[in-house]
Structure formats: structure tokens, C-alpha cells
Image (cartoon, rainbow, N blue to C red):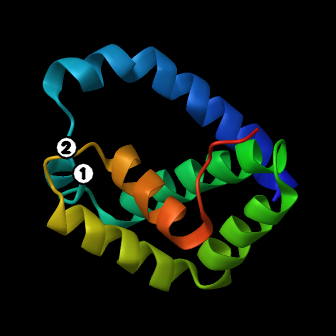
Amino acid sequence: MMKLVFPASIFAIFLVFCMPSYAKDGFKSSEFLTWQKDNRDAYVRTTVGTAGAIAGQNDEKHAKCLENWYFGDEQKSNDAIYKAMQANDSYHPRLIILAVLQKRCGTFKYR
């Protein structure tokens, strides 16, 4: 999991700078699902890795759940995420990923 922290951080910084274009265009899961599979998988892997890094700073049990669920069978996990995106295709892909992660492992609200 720690090997993912640096690349995930770079990706997160990149997303911050791209945020205005996403907001302007209303980036939706329907568009995301048209991407090539390798690109979709990389986006999801990086988003989950970032979520895991954040969880690791706050709740080790939560981080371990995310790691076990997603990286235990990445293809099965991606399929679950893509299925949720198909059912909710008007929402941003990150919102769908977050919702699936919360359903599997609990909230990201830390005390």
C-alpha cells in the first residue's frame, strides 16, 4: 500500500489542477465508461490507492479493508465499480468509486 502513496499523491495533485475542466464539462461516469479499459483501470486503481493512503493516516482497520477488498481481486472490484457507474452514469466517476468503497468498508468520516 505504501508503494502507492507517491504515485497517488502525484495523481491527486494533477486532479486538483484539472478540476475546473471537470466541473465545467460535467464529467460523468457515462463518459468515463467509454475510455479504454487500461485507462479506466489505472484511474480507478489510483483513486482507490489515494483513498487507502488517506484511510491509512486515520484508521488502519479501514485502510486494510480497502486494500483487501480492492487489491485482493482487482478485476472483480473494478467490475463492481463499473456496474455501479453504469447504474449511476450521470455522476462523476470519483463519487461512484467513493460510494462503492464506503459500501464495502465504511465511511471516510474520521474522528
In the displayed structure, 19 sits above or below 57; it is above
Residue 55 spot, x, y in % from top left: 74, 49
Q: Residue at horizontal 15%, vertical 25%? A: 25
In the displayed structure, 13 sits above or below 38; it is above
Q: CA distance from mark 1 to mark 2?
A: 6 Å
Name the residue nearer the viewer: 91 or 22: 91
Residue 70 spot, x, y in % from top left: 60, 73
Name the residue nearer the viewer: 28 or 101: 101
The secondary structure type at the circle numbered 1 is helix
Instruction: Inspect the image, locate mark 2, and give the three-letter code of the amino acid beneath it.
Output: Lys
Q: Residue at horizontal 35%, vertical 54%? A: 96
Left or right of 11? Residue 97 is: left
Instruction: Inspect the image, locate mark 1, and give the three-letter code of the amino acid beneath it.
Output: Phe
Left or right of 70? Residue 92 is: left
Q: Which residue of the protein is positioned furthest toward the front in this rendering?
A: 111
The secondary structure type at the circle numbered 2 is loop
Residue 72 spot, x, y in % from top left: 67, 83
Q: How packed is label 2: few (under 14 Cα within 10 Å), some, or many (20 or more)?
A: many
Specify the quadrant that holds the C terminus: top right
Specify the quadrant that holds the N terminus: bottom right
Circle 2 sits on which residue? 28
Name the residue nearer the viewer: 34 or 111: 111
Tell me whether circle 1 and circle 2 mark residues in contact (CB < 8 Å): yes
Left or right of 74? Residue 91 is: left
Disc number lying in front (1 or 2): 2
Residue 93 spot, x, y in % from top left: 32, 49
Q: Residue at horizontal 71%, vertical 77%? A: 68
In the displayed structure, 86 sits above or below 27; it is below
Circle 1 sits on which residue? 32
